[in-house]
Image (cartoon, rainbow, N blue to C red):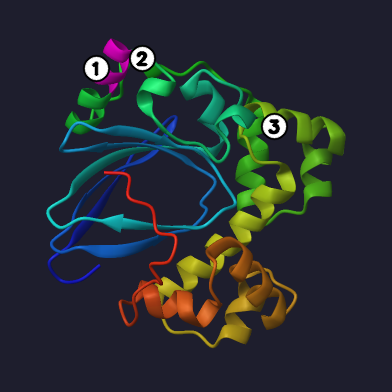
Amino acid sequence: MNETDAYREWAASGAVRCWWAQRAGDDHLQRVVPDAAADVIVSSTGAAYLVGPTLRPAVHLVPRGSQLRGLRVRTSAVAAVLGLPGHEVRDAVVPLTALLPDAAARSAAESVWRGEFPDALRPTPGDGRVRYAVRRIWSGVALDDVTAEIAVTGRQLRRLFTEHVGLGPKALQRVARFQRFVRSADARPVPLAAAAIAAGYADQAHLTRETRELAGVTPSVLVRERRGLVVPDGEGALALF
């Protein structure tokens, strides 16, 4: 984004990772990379979408003057909040009316725009084992250790994650490691080889392969994009609002 754009996040609690708002000063392209969460996104036009957890990067066309507000659902609460198995919303980019009746979808969109949790999305308690496992994987704990800590097998953990998260444990591990690199790169300039090791990659080549898969570009290009030094390639860009 440029100096006329604005993006803000507000910390939240419970099933909500954060609330956010964005205003676009000019037409621009914006790369979105996996973060293992689900978002309910509402435009000032009234359009409302669900974007599910994914391993796919995307480039979006954000028109000048666009105003967006969003509710970001925690990884472990995807199924609990949306009322659907996690695997059914993986990779989803759909109007909110695809999940809810029209009246409920309108009410939910209005609530998100006001910064209020929608009544139609009141979460169920979810699964404590999943919440614990997600936290541990996100912090870099090995999958074998996580399964031992919650006393399940690897197969059971995959089944729990498919149901509650939408991404499998190994997929979440990849996203968590990638996001550690992204946060580090956003915070300060770091040589890529050092950043790769700090994030948990075997080496810089490993980081490059994973970043190409999860972001669609090399680490150096991604870093430059996020610092506003280059703009994303617009080929295949999506316009949702």
Upstream in the sequence, badge 3 or badge 1? 1
Upstream in the sequence, badge 2 or badge 3? 2
Bounds of the magenta segment: 102-108
Within 10 angstroms of label 2, few (less than 14), some, or many (20 or more) residues? some
Does the residue at mark 2 contact the one at mark 1 (Cβ under 8 Å)?
Answer: yes
Residue on which disc 2 sits: 120
Residue on which disc 3 sits: 162
Residue 199 placement: quadrant = bottom right
Give the amino acid at mark 1.
Ser
Report the front residue among 230 and 148. Answer: 230
Residue 178 highlighted magenta (yes or no): no
Disc 1 on helix, strand or loop?
A: helix
Report the front residue among 3 and 115. Answer: 3
Assign the C terminus to one quadrant of the image.
top left
CA gap between label 2 and label 3 equals 23 Å
Residue 107 highlighted magenta (yes or no): yes
Residue on which disc 1 sits: 107
Q: Residue at x 78, y 39 (%)?
A: 149
Does the residue at mark 3 contact the one at mark 1 (Cβ under 8 Å)?
Answer: no
In percent of width and height, residue 99 lies at 44, 20
Left or right relative to 215: residue 141: right
Left or right relative to 39: residue 180: right
Disc 3 on helix, strand or loop?
A: helix
Left or right relative to 68: residue 132: right
